Amino acid sequence: MPSSATALALAGDGILVLGATMRLTRLVVTDDLGVWVLKWPARRWAARADPHSTGWQTKAVSGLDCPFCVGTWVGYGVLASYCLARRSPWLGGCWRFVAAGLALNEVAAHLGARLGDTATD
């Protein structure tokens, strides 16, 4: 049975996994940067590969608009990166730093939206 310190560290890492997954999912599904960097190039690729919009390429790219679809794959990626980062204390620290920044950004965005921050550029 893990010690209470180990259990607490794993719980903290779990929260970071959740926060990073939420932020990266929102980046792909709704943020302008995700549209420019991921969605538009993917849609161009699908249009070239599937000019009649009936093949698997078009269907795969349409999944980039689904938070459940994107969240699943992003979550797998975040979990895989966490498993790799745990192999080294240095990598683990770097992973936690990046994941904490993503989680903090996600929480700040939700709080801002709930508290009335509706400014748009």
Image: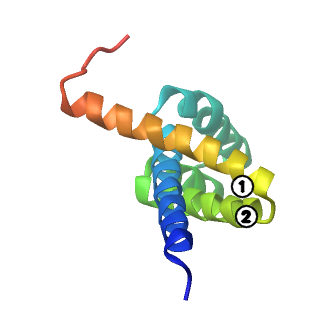
Q: Answer above or below: position of 30 versus 6.
A: above
Bin the neighbour count of mark 1 within 10 Å (Cα to Cα): few under 14, some 14-19, many 20 and up.
Answer: some
SS class, disc 1: helix
Bin the neighbour count of mark 2 within 10 Å (Cα to Cα): few under 14, some 14-19, many 20 and up.
Answer: few
Residue that mark 2 sits on: 86
Residue 84 occupies quadrant: bottom right
Seen at 56% across and 82% down, the residue is: 2
Seen at 19% across and 28% down, the residue is: 115
Seen at 36% across and 32% down, the residue is: 109
From the image, which quarter does the N terminus lie in? bottom right
Pick the front one: 80 or 44 = 80
How many angstroms separate mark 2 from mark 1 (CA)?
A: 5 Å
Pick the front one: 30 or 87 = 87
Seen at 50% across and 63% down, the residue is: 14
Q: Return the residue found at the far bottom.
A: 1
Query: Left of 38 or right of it: where is 106?
Result: left
Residue that mark 1 sits on: 92
State the image coordinates of residue 17 (x, y, percent, origin top left): 53, 57
Dots 2 and 1: beta carbons under 8 Å? yes
Query: Left of 62 or right of it: where is 97?
Result: right
Please tell me which of labels 2 and 1 falls first in the chain.
2
Q: Please, what is the three-letter code of the amino acid marked with disc 1? A: Gly
State the image coordinates of residue 96 (x, y, percent, origin top left): 62, 49
Q: Return the residue found at the far top.
A: 121
Q: Please, what is the three-letter code of the amino acid marked with disc 2? A: Arg
Residue 69 seen: yes
Query: Left of 74 or right of it: where is 118?
Result: left
State the image coordinates of residue 36 (x, y, percent, origin top left): 59, 27
Pick the front one: 60 or 92 = 92
